[in-house]
Amino acid sequence: MRYPIILHTDDQQQFGVTVPDLPGCFSQGDSIESAVENAQEAILFHAEGLVSGKQTIPLPSEIDISDFHQDN
């Protein structure tokens, strides 16, 4: 299962990550690569927390590429 993530940055040096399908799941990194790796770990940790709390893990939403945009 792969969850869509949103990468954001203000300075092109620090990258934040949010996971829209998992409220409260977020991460960051000093590069895009590390931000994505850290997001994968955050998703696993978040899912483990949901399971231990006997909550349902939401399914990932479909990605519609027409929703993609880049702010300049």
Image: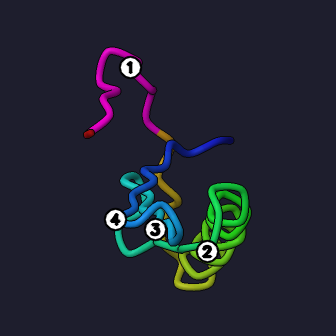
- Discs 1, 4 touching: Cβ within 8 Å: no
Query: Is the N terminus in the top left, top right, bottom left or bottom right quadrant?
Result: top right
| Residue 43 lies in the magenta stretch | no
**In this view of the protein, which residue sits in the foreground, 49 or 45?**
45
Choose top left, top right, bottom left or bottom right for residue 47. Answer: bottom right
> Badge 4: how crowded within 10 Å, few (<14), some, or many (20+)?
few
Provide the residue designation for mark 4.
10
* Amino acid type at image mark 1: Asp
Residue at 32% in and 34% down: 70
Please name which of the two marks, 4 or 2, marks the residue nearer to the observer.
Answer: 4
Circle 2 is placed at which residue position? Answer: 51
Which is closer to the viewer, label 3 or label 1? 3
Q: Which residues are magenta?
A: 61-71
State the quadrant of the C terminus. Answer: top left
Mark closer to the chain start, 1 or 2: 2
Q: Residue at x 38, y 75 (%)?
A: 24
What crowding class fits label 1: few (fewer than 14 Cα within 10 Å), some (14-19), or many (20 or more)? few
Task: Measuring from the top left, give residue 14's x and y in whole percent.
Answer: 51, 72
Does the magenta-highlighted stretch encompass residue 70? yes
Which amino acid, by three-letter code, is at mark 2? Val
